[in-house]
Image (cartoon, rainbow, N blue to C red):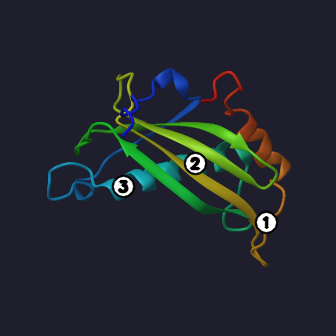
Amino acid sequence: MSARRRPGLRRDYARFHRITTRWMDNDIFGHVNNVQYYSWFDTAINTHLVEEGGFDPWNDRVVGFCVESGCRYFRPVRWPQPVEVGLRVGHLGNSSVRYECGIFLPGEEEACAEGHFVHVFVDRTVERPVPIPANIRRCLEAIARTPAESD
């Protein structure tokens, strides 16, 4: 068995999106349920695409389908703590992108959780992969890790 990886740091992420936790996010154990973290990843990613890339999820011909996601948990989050979702691009391909996300409590340097989320961009009508549109590619390049930063 390998040693548990340490949480990433705030400085490892290019953009942040603040999310308010809700009472219903807590589970019976008194902390935010694991499924909420995936929702936070999805919200931060799509907010970035809309605000920085001009993405129109209701009308654009090309959309991103999630084909893979994962998360590692380091410390629990509890309502009513707000969270800040750190976002960066770990890999940018022709039709796909791997986002890397960190969940942080405000003012804290170490992530409570870190995950990834892979989008494949497809033509909405035929649901087949297509190249990432130029406006989306530019907003992804702006938050991409450099080779020296990559694991």
Mark 1 falls on what kind of element? loop
Which residue position is annotated with label 3?
A: 36
Q: Which residue occupies 39% across, 31% down?
A: 111
Image x and y of residue 38, in percent: 44, 54
Q: Which residue lies furthest to the bottom in this view?
A: 126
Cα separation, mark 3 vs mark 1, equals 28 Å
Q: Quadrant of the N terminus?
A: top left
Q: Which residue occupies 31% across, 47% down?
A: 21
Cα separation, mark 2 vs mark 3, equals 14 Å
Going from N to C along the chain, the mark reached first, 2 or 1, is: 2
* 89 lies left or right of 106: right
Q: Residue 6 sits in which quadrant?
A: top left
* 76 lies left or right of 51: left
Which residue position is annotated with label 1?
A: 129
Q: Which residue lies furthest to the front in this view?
A: 1
Q: Residue 15 sits in which quadrant?
A: top right
Is residue 127 placed above or below 90 in the rendered structure? below
Q: Residues within 10 Å of mark 1 (few under 14, many from 20)?
A: some
Q: Residue furthest left?
A: 29
* Mark drawn on residue 62: none
* Mark drawn on residue 45: 2
Going from N to C along the chain, the mark reached first, 2 or 3, is: 3
Going from N to C along the chain, the mark reached first, 3 or 1, is: 3
Type of the residue with mark 2: Ile
